[in-house]
Image (cartoon, coloured by chain):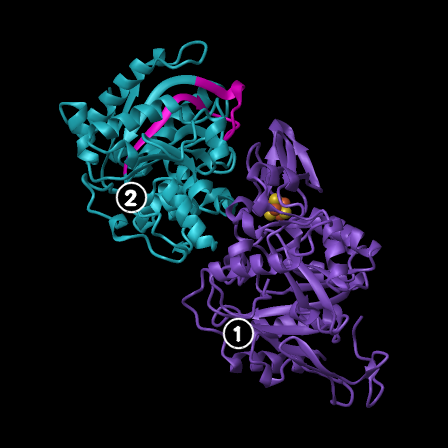
Chain colours: A cyan, B purple
């Protein structure tokens, strides 16, 4: 059996035919259904952004457990405020519809204590379904199955319901995409979905400065290890210029329930505090600006030097919003921060 | 990293690896070799893991790798630039020990090593990963992959003893660590060379030369010949096109020469990128000065690949101009590779009398006029090992 045919059968087994993946032999382009569509909501611009933060300190209990009901209320409130709709369903429908295939990018490198909470991912999947997205058309993903499992996700390649898998299960496009200074292969879930929900964590990162929305897509590509040089600059900014990300990313829902303000990207209990927030926007640059602000506040509060003073400032955030890249809004004065 | 003579798709590349492996794999039974096709991924991954060499433990479960000049500082759970080593709880592991992702039974001339055991066969292996990210890489499908991204069916578990036994069985005199970048599968290469010698096999390293002094000295003691890619001569070029720097490569070239190991150099000529007269001239003059006129220099033809698919293949005229520059600089043995065999650019001519002493065509030795390593016509010693 050739590699191609066995792979095709494997993808059919996964039930990914509808994603255009099963028909996608090596070196073939995704099927027409996977083509980029007109976004349902306006794309981010460098000129203005709205970021909504919902914060309830009680959502994280003393033992670290999550009050899921309260988290659901926070998510509804945040998405509703972002979309400026009266009801959560209408808000979700602003961004997604029944014809969407949605890839939900979580961040699970940090293990059980420092990953996007599965409870939050579950609530997001419920929100997507409320907008009419079929559960079989939702896939939660990250770089590796192994990372997802360690973070508490159930890897689910087949069967009914929302699925969850690492890129190692589905693989990467054969073709190299070159975007400015980045040359990479995108994972096949990203290239074959119609919409992306980006669910980063809010955390410190020793090389990048911080790891929030822009950095999270290092888990959507084949060679993140090649892009950490020079504090990941300009690589993170350049990667986010890729049309496949810009045109499909509809929503960023950042998990700031617990925040690691130093010693990241892996879990360091001594530098991690319950923060009890989620940060929601359609603009990844603006989310990073606000997230960085929070990390710097926490560092100052705990007597640590700023990332700038330590020469770890994430310069790629401003770069992503510059006049050449225009991924989103990096100007704090132009970011409308809404607290709900 | 320029062993593949023609443009290959990822599919062709993987097929080639698998086919080569399958062909040789016939002899695996009884040798302890294991094709991962028949094993589960977790088992395979465990077999390939070994603690890495040359790294320091840092506070906070971080490590610093000291194999190559990148000196990656790697946090817990993360990987270095080469992508095939991982920090697990403060211990650094190679994930590719014995994991031959690319294999072949090649003529030594294909490495290319023209002045080392001419006409011999080399059992050649490479794993996933590289410490460069050359925009023109001819083997990028494996060199730029993380180990788990290669199909299991194309990866063979050939630990050093299996490798040596297979080489003996298939009549190879040489083990070659090649295709991707042996610096990043250092542990496998080192053990392979040590075991190989016990089986009477020579070992050769086909490398970008981007390696620190200590690891180079350690492995060189067990190597018999080394080929190094000098990819350009300007640091700006190395930074932009390889994500590295030129100085450590030059240091390795001098180090290998000082150690008395047989050395050949490859310069992959990429149109408009590193083919300017100034850069080529400086590289050639430096080679003459640093390691002498007898070091063979192979100008290799570029084919559009990886991130430089918009460039044309190198015109023969450009390669010919490079050859002239090298000869004018004083180099005695200058070759052009990856071009049509009929051009005769692979032949060795005696630097003294100018007569053809070794004829080659398509990596095969077609005629040889040497007596005990000397020109059969004038008696001049032809450099080599
Ligand atoms: S061998 Fe790999 S991990 Fe080690 S320094 Fe070089 S690139 Fe980094």
Q: CA distance from mark 1 to mark 2?
A: 51 Å
Against B155, is A112 above or below? above
Figure check: A162 above or below B221? above
Q: Is residue B79 left or right of residue B217?
A: left
Mark 1 lies on residue: B276
Question: On the image, which quarter does residue B94 sit in?
Answer: top right
Is B169 on the left-hand or right-hand side of A140?
right
Residue A190 higher or lower than B264, as above or below = above
Determine the chain carrying the residue at label 1: B
Q: Position of residue B381 (x, y in %)?
A: 83, 80
Near mark 2 (Cα within 10 A), the count class, few <14, some 14-19 or many ≥20, is some
Quarter that holds the N terminus of chain B: bottom right
Q: Is residue A19 visible?
A: yes
Secondary-structure class at tag 1? loop
Residue in the foreground of this view, choosing between B101 and B218:
B101
Residue B338 vs residue B164, the one in the foreground: B164
Q: Which mark is residue B148?
A: none
């Amino acid at each position: 059996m050739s590699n191609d045919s066995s792979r095709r059968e494997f993808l059919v087994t996964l039930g990914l035919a509808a994603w255009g993946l099963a028909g996608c032999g090596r070196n073939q382009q995704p099927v027409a259904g996977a083509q980029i569509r007109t976004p349902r909501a306006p794309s981010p611009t460098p000129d203005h952004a709205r970021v909504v933060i919902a914060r309830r300190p009680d959502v994280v209990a003393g033992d670290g457990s999550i009050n899921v009901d309260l988290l659901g209320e926070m998510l509804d409130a945040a998405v509703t405020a972002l979309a400026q709709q009266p009801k959560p369903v209408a808000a979700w429908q602003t961004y997604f519809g029944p014809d969407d295939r949605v890839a939900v990018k979580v961040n699970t490198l940090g293990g059980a204590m420092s990953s996007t909470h599965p409870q939050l991912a579950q609530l997001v999947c419920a929100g997507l379904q409320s907008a009419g997205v079929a559960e079989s058309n939702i896939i939660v993903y990250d770089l590796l199955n192994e990372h997802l499992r360690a973070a508490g996700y159930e890897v689910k390649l087949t069967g009914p319901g929302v699925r969850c898998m690492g890129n190692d299960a589905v693989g990467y496009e054969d073709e190299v995409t070159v975007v400015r200074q980045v040359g990479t292969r995108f994972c096949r879930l990203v290239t074959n979905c119609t919409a992306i929900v980006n669910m980063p964590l809010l955390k410190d990162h020793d090389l990048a400065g911080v790891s929030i929305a822009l950095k999270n897509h290092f888990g959507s590509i084949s060679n993140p290890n090649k892009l950490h040089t020079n504090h990941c600059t300009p690589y993170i900014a350049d990667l986010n210029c890729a049309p496949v990300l810009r045109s499909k990313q509809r929503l960023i829902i950042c998990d700031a329930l617990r925040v690691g303000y130093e010693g990241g990207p892996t879990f360091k209990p001594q530098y991690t505090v319950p923060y009890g927030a989620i940060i929601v926007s359609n603009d990844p640059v603006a989310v990073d600006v606000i997230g960085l602000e929070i990390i710097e506040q926490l560092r100052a509060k705990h007597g640590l030097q700023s990332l700038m003073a330590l020469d770890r400032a994430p310069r790629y955030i401003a770069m992503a919003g510059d006049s050449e890249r225009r991924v989103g809004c990096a100007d704090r004065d132009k970011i409308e921060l809404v607290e709900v | 990293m320029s062993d593949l003579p023609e443009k290959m798709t990822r599919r062709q590349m993987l097929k080639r690896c698998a086919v080569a492996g399958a062909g040789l794999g016939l002899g695996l039974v009884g040798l302890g070799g294991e094709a991962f096709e028949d094993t589960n991924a977790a088992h395979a991954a465990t077999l390939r893991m070994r603690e890495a060499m040359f790294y320091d433990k840092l506070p906070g479960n971080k490590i610093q790798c000291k194999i190559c000049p990148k000196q990656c500082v790697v946090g817990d759970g993360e990987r270095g630039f080469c992508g095939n080593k991982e920090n697990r709880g403060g211990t650094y592991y190679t994930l590719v020990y014995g994991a031959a992702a690319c294999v072949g039974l090649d003529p030594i001339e294909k490495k290319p090593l023209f002045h080392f055991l001419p006409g011999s066969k080399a059992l050649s292996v490479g794993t996933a990963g590289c410490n460069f990210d050359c925009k023109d890489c001819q083997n990028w499908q494996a060199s730029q992959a993380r180990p788990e991204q290669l199909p299991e069916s194309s990866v063979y578990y050939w630990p050093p003893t299996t490798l040596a036994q297979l080489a003996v069985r298939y009549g190879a005199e040489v083990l070659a660590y090649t295709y991707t970048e042996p610096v990043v599968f250092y542990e496998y290469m080192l053990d392979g060379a040590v075991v190989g010698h016990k089986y009477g096999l020579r070992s050769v390293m086909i490398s970008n030369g981007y390696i620190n002094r200590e690891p180079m000295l350690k492995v060189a003691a067990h190597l018999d010949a080394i080929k190094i890619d000098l990819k350009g001569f300007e640091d700006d070029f190395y930074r932009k096109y390889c994500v590295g720097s030129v100085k450590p490569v030059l240091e390795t070239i001098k180090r290998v020469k000082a150690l008395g190991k047989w050395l050949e150099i490859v310069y992959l000529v990429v149109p408009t990128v590193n083919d300017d007269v100034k850069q080529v001239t400086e590289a050639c003059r430096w080679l003459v000065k640093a390691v002498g006129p007898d070091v063979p220099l192979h100008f290799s033809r570029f084919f559009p690949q990886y991130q430089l698919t918009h460039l044309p293949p190198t015109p023969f005229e450009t390669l010919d101009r490079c050859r002239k520059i090298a000869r004018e600089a004083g180099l005695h043995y200058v070759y052009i590779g990856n071009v049509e065999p009929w051009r005769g650019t692979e032949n060795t001519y005696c630097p003294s009398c100018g007569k053809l002493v070794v004829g080659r065509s398509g990596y095969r030795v077609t005629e040889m006029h040497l007596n005990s390593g000397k020109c059969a016509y004038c008696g001049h010693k032809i450099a080599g090992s």
